[in-house]
Amino acid sequence: MSISKYDYKRILTVQDISCVGQCSLTVALPILSACGVETAVIPSAVLSTHTAGFKGFTFRDLTGDMPLILEHWLREGIKFDGMYTGYLGSETQIDYCIEIAAKTLKDGALLIVDPAMADNGVLYKGFDNDFVKAMRKLVGKADLAVPNLTEACFLTGNDYRETYDKDYIRKVCADLLALGAKKVVLTGIGFEEGFTGVFVSDGRSEYYYRHEKLPGGCHGTGDVYASAFSGALMRGKTVEEAAAIAADYTVLCIKNTMGDKDHWYGVKFEPVLPALADMLK
Ligand code: PXL
């Protein structure tokens, strides 16, 4: 096998570890590694499982470790080419993420924010309006904000709709950009029966990538998408290319999981990781 040479980048991802459930760090770390990107992590909390469907999960908050980790990294002069934030557990963690980004990102590095906090019109268990308000600040610092439509509506105060036209989506994007985000990658946006897609806008230009809509929702697809998107960006793909690659990979993951009733808690993303690596060649 030949050794492939490319611009090798280091990304930091900050999110929880759900020990079982195929989401957050147990998805981000393998996907970013498969993309060929050095990945550093800050686990913001450790849960026995994710919170969407399991009962009685444990939750160990690691907020107190975040400033200590940052202090050590500053002493070591550790810097990153990118930072990707996912599910965070509190307003304080959001503030630490803003500080970590300000102090550890190299010039020109990208801050990618997935405001993982809601889906299907409702906030996940444990989140409230104060958290949404704090998340607006982090989204405002993002080079790339990667929300689904529910998250985008909570962030901007727009009514969540199941059906809509392009002008509604343009308004939601404009309101996200008004928070300060430089570019928005809105996931799960469908204008036609049987299709969904990704809508990308920076207020000057827009791009829409349509893909198959598969029946039934799968938990964890937002984390799969944001991880693959971040990995593809770190591999030098354009935002539009990365948005499309991440969509194609997420569809593959869902197809690989559909029909397995025992696997309701996440997507079987591992068997199709080689396809993601191929898309980045
Ligand atoms: O997939 C997002 C996610 C991440 N981490 C935890 C969650 C969820 C969604 O419910 O509960 C702990």
Image (cartoon, rainbow, N blue to C red):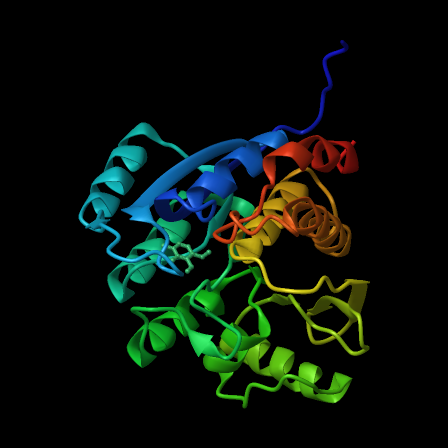
Residue 61 lies, with reference to residue 163, above or below; the image says above
What residue do we see at 36% from left, 46% from top? 18
* Residue nearest the viewer, comparing 130 with 260: 260
Q: Position of residue 129 (x, y in %)?
A: 33, 80
In the current view of this chain or complex, which residue is farthest to the top? Answer: 1
Q: Give whichever of 200, 7 is nearer the camera.
A: 200
Q: Is residue 223 left or right of residue 273?
A: left
Where residue 41 sits, quadrant-wise, is top left
Q: Quadrant of the N terminus?
A: top right
Q: Position of residue 55 (x, y in %)?
A: 29, 58
Res 127 → quadrant: bottom left
Question: Residue 190's spot in the image, x, y percent?
Answer: 74, 74
Quarter residue 12 falls in: top left
Q: 255 or 210: nearer the eye? A: 255
Q: Quadrant of ligand 1?
A: bottom left
Please tell me which residue is depicted at 70% across the width and 82% down the height of the picture: 170
Q: Residue at x 39, y 69 (%)?
A: 124
Quadrant of the rendering where the C terminus is positioned = top right
Q: Is residue 70 left or right of residue 21?
A: left
Q: Is residue 34 above or below residue 16?
A: above
Q: Position of residue 64 (x, y in %)?
A: 18, 48
Q: Is residue 216 above or below residue 24?
A: below
Do we see residue 233 in this rendering? yes
Left or right: residue 55 versus residue 24 is: left
- Left-right relation of 115 to 186: left
- Between residue 244 and residue 190, name the one nearer to us: 190
